[in-house]
Image (spheres, rainbow, N blue to C red):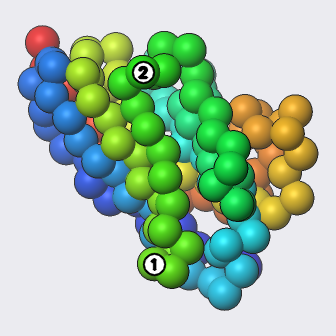
Amino acid sequence: QVQLVESGGGLVQAGGSLRLSCTASGRTFSQHTIAWFRQAPGKEREFVAAIRWNSRHTYFTDSVKGRFTISRDNAKNTVYLQMNSLGPDDTALYSCAADTGVILSSTRYATAYDYWGPGTQVTVSS
């Protein structure tokens, strides 16, 4: 069982930066693939980024490539999503998700993850 809690969201002006954190309980955190998803009002949830358990592989949706980075500190049971050059289109509720045994082809799909945090709101003003 893994419990996830996100933090770091807030209100930022366009062009600004935020760093989101996803902190997990559980001794097997280092074995989990961690992903970030976001959902804007009236829109479907979309994949943002993911990092494999060994940090060797990271994935990003096209719209955030070059602006967002993802990293993890297994000693702190935490994954970070550094978001730079934010724009109004990045406004959404950001949630992290975790699971073990996520195959590469499923990394971007919400159905691959059993554990979810409640989310943290990111609002970017223009």
Local secondary structure at mark 2: loop
Residue at 34%, 50% in the rendered image:
20
In the displayed structure, does residue 17 sit left or right of residue 93? left
Quarter of the image that includes the C terminus: top left
**3D distance between C-alphas at marks 1 and 2:** 26 Å
Return the x and y of residue 123 as percentages of the image width and height. Answer: 23, 31
Residue at 69%, 43% in the rendered image:
57
Residue at 81%, 46% in the rendered image:
112
Q: Nearer the viewer, residue 34 or 70?
A: 70
Residue at 26%, 23% in the rendered image:
86
Q: Amino acid at mark 1?
A: Lys
State the residue position of label 2. 66
Q: Is residue 87 above or below residue 39?
A: above
Q: Is residue 1 above or below residue 64?
A: below
**Disc nearer the start of the sequence (1/2):** 2
Q: Nearer the viewer, residue 111 or 105?
A: 105
Quarter of the image that includes the N terminus: bottom right
Return the x and y of residue 39 as percentages of the image width and height. Answer: 49, 30
In the displayed structure, does residue 119 sit left or right of residue 82? right
Q: Is residue 82 above or below residue 4?
A: above
State the residue position of label 1. 76
Q: Nearer the viewer, residue 72 or 46?
A: 72
Return the x and y of residue 59 as percentages of the image width and height. Answer: 64, 33
Q: For the view shown, which residue lies furthest in the front direction? A: 56
Total labels drawn: 2
In the figure, residue 18 lies in which quadrant?
top left
